[in-house]
Amino acid sequence: MLLWYVWIRLVDGAWHRLDDISKQLHLPKNAVEWAAKFLCDKGMAESGFEEDEIRLHQGGARFEDAVKTLLSSANPPR
């Protein structure tokens, strides 16, 4: 759910401050930072020049891709 909450704030493609997202969602900043880092590490979002800014990549990444990536990293191959 956390990823979805952060993702839905980013779908407009504009730059967003992590502090603002944290306040809007009434979530701890470290939780929002984790979600932002995850999305950036998986190539679905990008960090701004300032450390606390984020936006979705313009390539049209989908939330389903974020979920699949999360599930595959949680379930290592056997």
Image: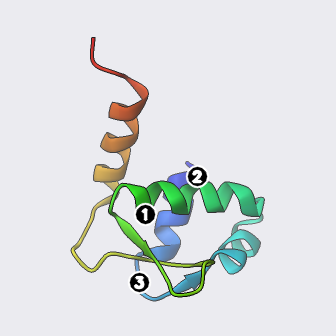
- Residue 51 horizontal/vertical position (percent): 60, 78
Q: Which mark is residue 2?
A: 2
**Above or below, comparing residue 67 to residue 27 in the picture:** above
* Crowdedness near tag 2: few (<14), some (14–19) or many (≥20) residues, C-alpha within 10 Å: few
N-term-proximal mark, 1 vs 2: 2
Residue shown at 53% from the left, 63% from the top:
36
Outermost residue toward the top? 78
User: Viewed as shown, does residue 16 lie left or right of 44?
Assistant: right
Residue shown at 72% from the left, 76% from the top:
19
Q: Quadrant of the C terminus?
A: top left
Mark 1 vs mark 3: give the one in front.
1
Q: Amino acid at mark 2?
A: Leu
Question: How far apart are the two marked residues, 1 and 3, measured between alpha carbons?
Answer: 16 Å
Q: Amino acid at mark 1?
A: Cys
Q: Does dot 1 land on a helix, a strand or a loop? A: helix
Which residue is nearer to you in this view: 43 or 63?
A: 43
User: Viewed as shown, does residue 60 lie left or right of 26?
Assistant: left
Mark 1 vs mark 2: give the one in front.
1
Which residue is nearer to you in this view: 50 or 10?
A: 50
Residue under label 3, please give it. Answer: 12
- Residue 33 horizontal/vertical position (percent): 63, 62
Q: Amino acid at mark 3?
A: Asp
- Residue 63 horizontal/vertical position (percent): 35, 57
Residue under label 1, please give it. Answer: 40
Q: Does dot 3 land on a helix, a strand or a loop? A: loop
